[in-house]
């Protein structure tokens, strides 16, 4: 039977960041990190579109993303540890109605000092080969695709390589002495009364109960605090002990299209959006995104679906060919004719861990910290989420984000959750 | 294939109230109510402790309960339809620390005109045979049972017979022409694009999708609006279509103890708390409650457990004997020696449908209204919840509660949920 001060379950980006910050802030704490996979970052961390942006209306949202991105940037630029971060920008392509709806929000963001640039339909046509006028196109009208009236490019945004961030955190925690246990499956969390009587039926309702560790495939690990950072699999650990993480898994699919034609080459190396001479991350109307993957000479494309797509976790999610063919491709080629005829060369699927409001969920119960619900923005917020989870694990009321901003450690809790609505919803 | 304007799934108290108010407000609407059970109210509606109180701090909480209770009272007193309502009061027994913590809340409630009476330890000893001083009692000290410093009796509170309320709503909806379909199991909700293309893979992510009805054991029922009011079973219907109700089932157990001894007879017929000469509903420290059931010459007793009790629905939940013996009884007999040696003569189990904040969850999606998450106070709030769900089903922004108060129909939604914290937490 092992015993540690802090046991972290899940070596995805959130669990890694949490273990890192616990050990940073409490070097004398013994910390173990367990994951069923053979190494870190093998779950949904590596299955995202790996983009980031510090461009949100909600101040909480913004603080989580902006400080995490600044931390990652400091790793890459000051520590010289390449995370593959490229600030290529995040381009929202908006219809007239969408632009009208978000214009006040954009102006408020500009007042707060957030940089963005506005592109006209002509500039978008010229720079990206974008079709901005779809009127008269029968297929586009069937799909109710709106004309593009304006492009809004958020500048503090781009793409990165999550496996490098995983490598950074995992090498640092190993140096600091965190015990990593890969290939270790958690069977269940252990709940016990603070003062056991030795009855088989405990904890009794009048007893003060706490999480005392986990039973794993390597035996029991007892801990003062157990951190559940198991992403979309968190409910499978927490439901049996009666703790609701208020987030559920929904499938996410990413398709890789090689830039094999001259048209796609031109798009990939579009000029006029950033200093890299690469197309920005593009969000088309109807939620279809195009993420340049210059190192692969490719694009990653996808979209998310809502009503009708089940909340259901499965061990080996597979991408669905019709999702690309009927769900993504018709929108893609309507706006970006360079994609005409393009088929995916590869694809993968993972899970969004969708919370009640799209924000991470971080809270504590006796002996337990939960850090999950990252809702598709886990990588870009992981460092801040890890700092908040570490603060709760160490019994602190405040967490200090990168750059020094203090934040209430209970802000992402399920009970007294106080998060402004995100008004930049496109 | 059937077709209705509004299909309500679940003939528990919430589904019944919703069908009633839809039909009241829209007599020309065709409404169907389906339930897998052979009749209405056969699920968790009939498995609660069947008590009510209009004594809450949160104004939302208060509005839902107070207007529902007033409506039920009007049924009983004005319509002459006996619901078994007896205003016996709800007695919180508080330790010194608990009283200190809630005293400002109580004073605020008094300022708002909510009546309550305060009882001294001597009055409680005299009136109920309550032991208020447990110091020196080894078992009580092991359980950390505090001394009782004060009793607070909320007056607009009591007990009722949910099966009578079920009977009221179900007879009224039958008169009004709601088509009830009992013994009808819902296999799944139907999600379709607004404008289908005839592909097997629809709805596609760019299509506007909606709930178009349900596939049941009696065939397909198509509806403009489908209301899911399936209580703790709602996630089993909603997860497959990717809608999160943000509530989960947790087992609730109620034990019946006959008032067979002179001591329990005296307690059951305690004087000085209400005009009925019946003990009030008593909430002991540690959450154990004692609910008089004078028509059965008995008490219903129970408590709720939290950390360690799984979120898990099962078709035929059973009460657990050790839950009474070790979880309820030791607290019960420590405070109320009349229960010494008392064993349950009967017991049952059902589910709490626990939401994020203990408040009901009511929201709409295209073609869908969800009304669930009643968290153990479904009966006492059902009429208001039904009015809000009916308003959403009829496409209205406001609901009118009994007595005329208008309330925003989105107030109990998951997205822009705006509910004050309930500070009367004991």
Image: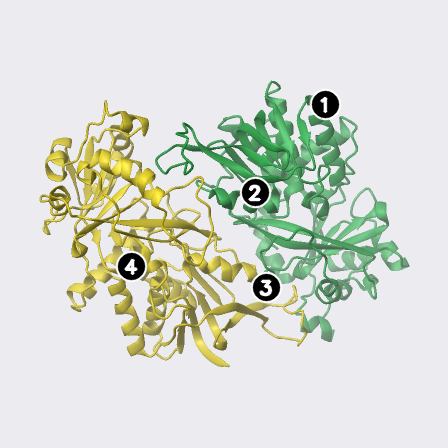
Chain colours: A green, B yellow
Mark number displayed over residue B321: none
| Mark 2 or mark 1, whichever is nearer to me | 1
**A345 and A78: which is toward the camera:** A345
Residue at the spot of label 2: A360
Pointer 4 indicates a residue of which chain?
A: B
Residue B365 is at least partly visible in this image = yes
Q: Is residue A110 left or right of residue B72?
A: right
Residue where numbered disc 1 is placed: A175
Quarter-of-image position of residue A128 = bottom right
Q: Is residue A375 left or right of residue B347?
A: right
Q: Nearer the viewer, mark 4 or mark 1?
A: 1
- The label on residue A308 is 3
Is B304 above or below relative to A407?
A: below
Q: Report x, y in % for residue B270.
A: 11, 44
**Do dots 2 and 3 share one subunit?**
yes
In the image, B113 versus A26, the foreground residue is: A26
| Viewer-nearest of discs 1 and 3 | 1
Find disc 4 in the rendering and name its residue. Answer: B405
Crowdedness near tag 3: few (<14), some (14–19) or many (≥20) residues, C-alpha within 10 Å? many
């Amino acid at each position: 039977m092992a015993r540690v001060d802090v046991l972290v379950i899940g070596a995805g980006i959130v669990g890694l960041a949490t273990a890192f910050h616990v050990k940073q802030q409490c070097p004398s704490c013994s910390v173990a990190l367990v994951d069923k996979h053979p190494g870190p970052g093998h779950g949904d961390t590596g299955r995202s579109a790996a983009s980031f942006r510090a461009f949100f209306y909600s101040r909480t949202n913004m603080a989580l993303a902006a400080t995490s991105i600044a931390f990652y940037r400091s790793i890459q630029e000051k520590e010289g540890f390449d995370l593959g971060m490229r600030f290529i920008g995040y381009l929202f392509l908006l219809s007239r109605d969408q632009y009208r709806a978000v214009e006040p929000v954009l102006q408020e963001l500009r007042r707060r000092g957030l940089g963005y640039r506005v592109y006209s339909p002509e500039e978008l046509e010229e720079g990206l080969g974008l079709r901005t006028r779809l009127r008269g196109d029968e297929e586009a009208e069937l799909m109710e695709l709106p004309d593009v009236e304006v492009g809004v490019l958020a500048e503090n945004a781009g793409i990165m390589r999550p496996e490098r961030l995983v490598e950074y955190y995992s090498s640092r925690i190993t140096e600091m002495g965190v015990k990593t246990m890969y290939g270790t499956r958690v069977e269940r969390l252990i709940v016990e009364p603070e003062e056991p009587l030795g009855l088989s039926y405990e904890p009794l309702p009048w007893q003060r109960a706490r999480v005392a560790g986990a039973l794993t495939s390597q035996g029991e690990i007892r801990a003062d605090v157990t951190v559940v950072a198991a992403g979309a699999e968190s409910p499978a650990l927490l439901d049996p002990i009666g703790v609701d993480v208020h987030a559920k898994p929904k499938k996410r699919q990413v398709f890789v299209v090689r830039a094999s034609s001259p048209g796609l080459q031109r798009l990939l190396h579009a000029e006029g959006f950033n200093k890299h001479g690469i197309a920005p991350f593009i969000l088309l109307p109807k939620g279809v995104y195009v993420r340049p993957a210059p190192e692969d000479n490719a694009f990653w494309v996808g979209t998310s679906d809502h009503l009708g797509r089940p909340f259901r976790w499965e061990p080996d999610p597979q991408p669905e060919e019709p999702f690309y063919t009927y769900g993504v491709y018709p929108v893609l080629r309507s706006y970006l004719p360079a994609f005409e005829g393009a088929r995916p060369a590869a694809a993968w699927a993972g899970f969004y861990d969708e919370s009640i409001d799209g924000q991470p969920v971080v809270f504590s119960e006796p002996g337990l910290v939960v850090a999950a619900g990252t809702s598709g923005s886990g990588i870009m917020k992981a460092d801040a989420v890890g700092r908040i989870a570490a603060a709760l694990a160490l019994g602190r009321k405040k967490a200090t984000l990168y750059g020094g901003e203090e934040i209430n450690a209970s802000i992402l809790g399920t009970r007294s959750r106080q998060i402004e609505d995100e008004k930049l919803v496109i």
